[in-house]
Each structure stands twice: as structure tokens, then as C-alpha cells.
Image (cartoon, helix red, strand yellow):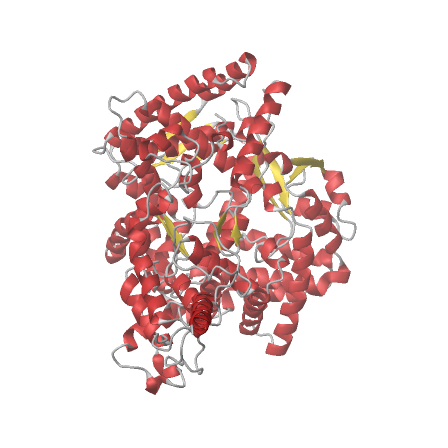
Amino acid sequence: MNKIRARMLGILLCVALLFSIVPAQAASKAEEFVTREEAVVSLLNTIGLAALNDAPSDLSVFSDADQINSENADKIAIAITNGLLPVEPGEALELGVHITRLEFALIVGNSMRELPAIRSPLAFEDVPAEVAGKIDRITSAGLMSGYGNGCFGSDDYLTKGQLEVVLNKIRALSSIRPQDDFFYAINHQWLSTTKLPAGYPGMTTFDEVDRRNTDKLKAIVKDLVENRDTYQEGTIEQKIADFYLTILDMENRNKEGIKPIQKYLDLIDGVSSAQELLDAMVQLEAETGMRPLVSFAPDADLNDSNRHSLYAAGLSTGLPADYILMGNPQIDALYTGVITQLFSLSGIPEAEAAEKAHSLYAFEKVIAQNTMKNEEASKVENIYNPVSRAELVGMFPSVDLDKYLSDLGFGSVDTIILSDVNLMKKTGELLSDDNLDVLKTYCRFRILASTASLLSKDFRDVTMNFQKAFYGISSTMDEEEIAFNLLNSVMSDYLGRIYVERYFSAKAKADVESIVSDIIAAFEDRIEALDWMGQETKEKAITKLKTIKVKIGYPDKWKDPLKDISIKTYADGGSLLGNIFAINSAQVKENKSLLSKPVDRSAWYMPPHMVNAYYNPTNNEIVFPAGILQPPYYDVNASREQNLGGIGTVIAHEITHAFDNNGAQFDENGNMNNWWTEQDYTVFRQKCQAVIDLYDGLVIAPGAVVNGNLTVSENVADIGAMACILDIAADIPDVDYKALFESYAAIWRFTGTEQIYQMLATQDVHAPNKYRVNRVLQNFEEFYKTYDIQPGDAMYLAPEERVTVW
């Protein structure tokens, strides 16, 4: 009996152990499973709707709409709008079926654009490769995990107990420690409650401030429009009001349809050789400012920044070259689809339009294969390639490029600077009669793509729908927003002038100038204290530092690039594209005249109301428009530490650009000139490589991986800025480092769609904003002491891995 009892107990123990390790699918029947409807509604009740697009979808387009619980219909409609339930119209929602763990995890990921990263991602045998990155986000945030046996339980149904565990973990996200994800912990409230405005794939603090500026300017424009009859022709006020009205006049734009560009499409259709196509490009540039094929434009010479040189660019792709080459079927179909639609709207039969779209795509793939990689193009030494006129002409064996240059007005130019030599050579090969048909198709598409948003509504809707799908956004801008953005891009100088007069104070300008002086002085001390740089190089670096020109607020002298241009409404015989073509062609003509003029060192390359800043190496200057000199970047009433963490780090960042991997190649006069000793420059490059290694491979979103080579210049500037600012802060009695660090985290807030993260990872020279905070602060002991960060905390970086350059 005892043997039998012992045997029975052994069997029961084995059964108990077995049930403790089998998947939840085989759990007790008392544990009920969750339906899709229950999962979605419970999730939305937990996260709230604050960060989601709250425009509900039309549920009637789904085949089982009559089965939707009326109490939950609104939330289901919002879930569909935001892509939580990826169901196409006509399909069944199947809200009553049980939801799998994998499906629920994907819905959780789609519901929250930003999550912390507090754990290392896990690999699961049963998670499909195409969604592994999405599951990594969930496990890294600690919201879900697997069974501990290498499986996630992808096909298992989600139980109510598991659902509640996940929901509780989501509720706990507000308590993420600064020691584990500083960016998320400081910005959690903003990240979890910020909506993406209509038409925006991403939202930053920069965008928030810019939208405040925009609201102020919109009110001004509205007033100008209401009083347009009181302004004399040719005044700034008349030009702003009438140009804005032409944008909004969709009735007349619809009447004109394709007419504004038909002349140029016909011009291209009528050519019978590659040489005639070049001749047509001369006319197109002169009358519209468009340059679809080989383009030439003057700019400051990098070796002699006092004079202008002629720069040339070859063929390019409609999408970034990386996207053309990645072979993503969805993106390929999306791109060829928009080409087909534009061709069809322009009068080409649909079947022929589709055929041309695919031939163009194949052509652009050749161009992409010969385009310099972004990480190479981000290095200034790679994009300055002077060649003689004869050398360039020799790259185009099938056409007379010498004639083309002369026809454009560059008959006396002997040297041209190429930004991408290999691409220009390939452009020369492709520009031949053998490729005439696809070259004409290429030019047609470039004209259509450049003007579609300015034509009738059907053309504009095609481009907006493409952008909506490409960037993963759920809504588009309204008419007023579209109109203002176009007005701002074309007449930014006028709007900036008005903005400064009404909203920028002399007190703010003087205070920021004093901050700049403090930062330059601190940067000088840091250069003097460098243990890796010799005295000879230090002296030249300090000379360059002290020579940096500082521009704050707005230009000393206002320019009027539109002074000789007449802006007319449709009622006055004008049109939107007519106005834009007049402006563009005048600017092209003005730019060509620069070749005979010295570089204007007083010029600004951003309008005063723009929320941004820049360093210009050829002028050795830092520029801070009035638009950025406001909270949260700068506040005259804020503490010193808050302003140092805000505008202080922006200023120091731009100063450090004078000494990043690109800026370090320019001297105090703005000329590309080596002022380093060989030994010091070797060490400097090693330190830049350490920065590359520090960032390379970091993951910010599924399919979005940081390229350390592409982002090195900005990362050097970010780290150098914080080092400089912390030196200044150390001299403040009872310094409040928390205020400084948290102000810094706030100015880099960012939230966006998965698609925008993926695009920025391949195209943007800046690291993702999260790493502009976390990866920077991990290098400084003051940060560790302030938040008591210890080994084992996710924000901890071993001392030997920390990097400083300046």
C-alpha cells in the first residue's frame, strides 16, 4: 500500500511539474481565453486615447459590422483608425474569436508609439522573423515574456490572467526609473499623451514650438487676407495675402487641372534625341526653376570660402536610394503605384502608365546602385571633387554637355565641383539616345512629382495618400495647414520679418549672447586642458574658436528676394503655379549671378521664426534664429541650470560642430585646410571612431538601427556640448544637476511612427532623439552621481566604454 501510495504521489508530482511548464494553451479550463474585442477594449481602457488619433473609422465597411457590440463600437472604430486591428474594408473583424499571444503583443506595440528599453530583447523560436523586431520592443519594455523554454507561445490563446498581467505592467510604465531609461522616465507623460497632428509622421519639441509660432503667424496672415484691399500692389502684405489666396483657391486650381504644366510635358514628349532633351531642360529651368536632369548651382567654395564655385549634381531617385535598393515588396508597390497614378492623371492610358512606372523604377534602381551611400556623403571630404570642364564634358560621350553648360549661362566656367563622382559618370553614360524613352519618362515623373501638390485636388490627393501610406500616418493636414506650410516655405523671409517685429525681445537676444560668451570661454578652457592634443594644435583650435561669428535672432539687414516679382490671384489673371514659377525662375537667375560676386558673409540660411540652429563651416559661424529662443529651450525666467540644459546645450552643440569630424577640416576663415599636426589628427580620428562604435547598432524601432558612421558628426557635437555645459554648471553654487539633465531630456522629446524611425535611421545624420539623451548622459560622472546609477542599471555604462572627445 505504501509503495502504491508512493507511486501515485510520484505520478501526481510529475503531472504537476508537467502542467507547470506546458504552454498556457493547455492551462486549466477554468482559465478563460480572451476575445479580440475584449483584448482591444481592455487595452484602450488602460492606455487611454490621449496619444491616439481619435477619429473613428467607418465600421460599416466590414462584413461582420452587425455583430459589433454597440458599447464597444467607438473604441473598435478608433483602434482601426490607429492600425491596432490591421483589417481591410470588406473583410471580417472577427471580434468574437480568441486572440493569440502574438496577435495581442503586436496590438500592444501598435497602440503605443514609445516604450522604454529596460531589458535585453529575447529571441523566440516561434516568433516569425518578420515581426521579431516588434516583439523585441514588447519584451525589452518588460510587458511580456516567453515561457522560459525558448518559446513565446505565439499561437497560444491569451488568457484573462495573462491579459491582466500585461495591463498592470502597462500601468506601471509611469514608474520607470531614470536609472533604467532616462529619456522615457523624464518624458513619460508627454510620450504617452501626445497626439501626432494630422499629416505629421513624428512630433518633437521643435515641432511643438514651431506650431506655436505658426499659430501666431496664421493669425497675422488671416488679418492680412481680410484687409488685402487696403494694401498697395508690390507691398509685402499684398504679396503674402494674394499668394495665400491662390493656394486656397481650389476651385480655380481644379478648373486648370494639368494645364499649368502641360506645356512642359508636351515639350518633353516632342524631343527626338538626348541632346534635344538637354535643350528642353534649359527652357524648363529658365521658365520654372525645375532641373530634372543634370543640375548646376553656385555655392561657397570649400577651399576658398570667399568666392562661389559651380557645383553639379547628376540624376537622382524619387525615393531615397536605400529604399529603392532594399527590395521591400510593399514599398516597391507603393512607389510604382504612385508613379502609375500620376502618369494616368497626366493623360497616359492606365496600362501604359503602369508599364512606364515599372521601366522608370528599373532605371532608378541603376541610379541608386551608383549613388554614394549616405554615410559616405556625410563626410565633407567625399563631396568636394573639383574637375575641369573638359573632364566633366568627357563623362558625357553621347551629348554635348559643353553646349548645355553654355546654354545655362556657365560658358566661362572652367572648374566644376562634383558631390558624387561615380553618380555623375553613370549619369553621363545613361544620357544617350538609347535611353531616350526612359529619360523622357524620368523627366515627366520629376515634373509631375514636383508640381502635383500644387495642381488640382486629384493630383494633390495622390501625393498625400502616398505620404500617408509611406510614413504610416492615419490622417492628413487640413486645407489651412497645407496652405500655410506652402506660404511659409515660399515667403519665409517676409513672415520672419513680421514675426521678429512682434514677438522677439531685445532682452532675450542680449541674455542669449551672454550665454554664448560663457560657453565659448568654457570651451576654450576645455581645449587647454585636453591631454591628447599638442600645444601647436591647441593654439590653432582656440584661434578658430575665438573667430566664430555669432548670429542671434535675425539678420542685421533684411533682404527682399521677391521685390521684382508680381504676385497675382486667379481673379487678377494669376495662378498658384504661375506665381511659384515666377519666384523659382527669378531665384535661379539670381543664384547664377553669384559666380561673379564674393560670398555674402552676412547671409542667413534659416528664416528668423524657424525653430532650429546651425553651424556653417565655410563662414565659421553659429546661427540661432529667434524662433528657438523660447521655452522649453530658453526662458528668461527659468533657472540657470534649466537654460543650460536647454538652449545652452544647443549652443554648445553648434560650437562643437566647428570641431567635429567635418568641421575640424575647416580653419578659422572657413576654408577646408588642415591645421592639425599629424599625431593630433590621428588621435582625433581614433576618438571619433570610439564615438562611432558607441552608437553603431543601437536599435530605436523595428527595422531602425543606428548607423554610427552616418551620425558621428552630430554625436561628437552632442557629447562635446554636454561636457562643456557641465563645466559651466560646476561653478554654480549648489548646482541643481537634476534641473539641467531633465531640461536636456525635455528638449529632445520625440514620438513618431515606425516608418519615420526607419526612414530617419537611413537618412538622418542625427542619432534618434532618445539616444541624443541616454547615450550622451551615460558618458558623464555627474549624471551617475545625480541619479545614483549603479552597475546592473540599464543606464549604466562601464567607465572604460565611456567616450569624450572635446
Residue 196: percent from the left, percent from the top? 35, 58
Picture layout, residue 163 above or below residue 673: below
Quadrant housing residue 19: bottom left
Report the number of numbered marks. Answer: 0
Quadrant housing residue 164: bottom left
What residue is drawn where x is 36% and y is 27%? Answer: 725
What residue is drawn where x is 30% and y is 33%? Answer: 740
Residue 314: percent from the left, percent from the top? 65, 49
Q: Quadrant of the N terminus?
A: bottom left
- Residue that lies at the very extreme toward the left in this rendered image: 637
Query: Is residue 663 left or right of 507 when viewed as pictured?
Result: right
Q: Is residue 775 or residue 246 the one in the foreground?
A: 775
Q: Is residue 544 or residue 564 the one in the foreground?
A: 544
- Residue that lies at the very extreme toward the top in this rendered image: 535
Quadrant housing residue 72: bottom left
| Visible residue check, residue 579 | no
| Visible residue check, residue 681 | yes
Query: Is residue 431 left or right of 750 when viewed as pictured?
Result: right
Q: Is residue 479 or residue 76 the one in the foreground?
A: 76
Residue 649: percent from the left, percent from the top? 37, 33
Picture layout, residue 319 above or below residue 510: below
What residue is drawn where x is 37% and y is 79%? Answer: 95
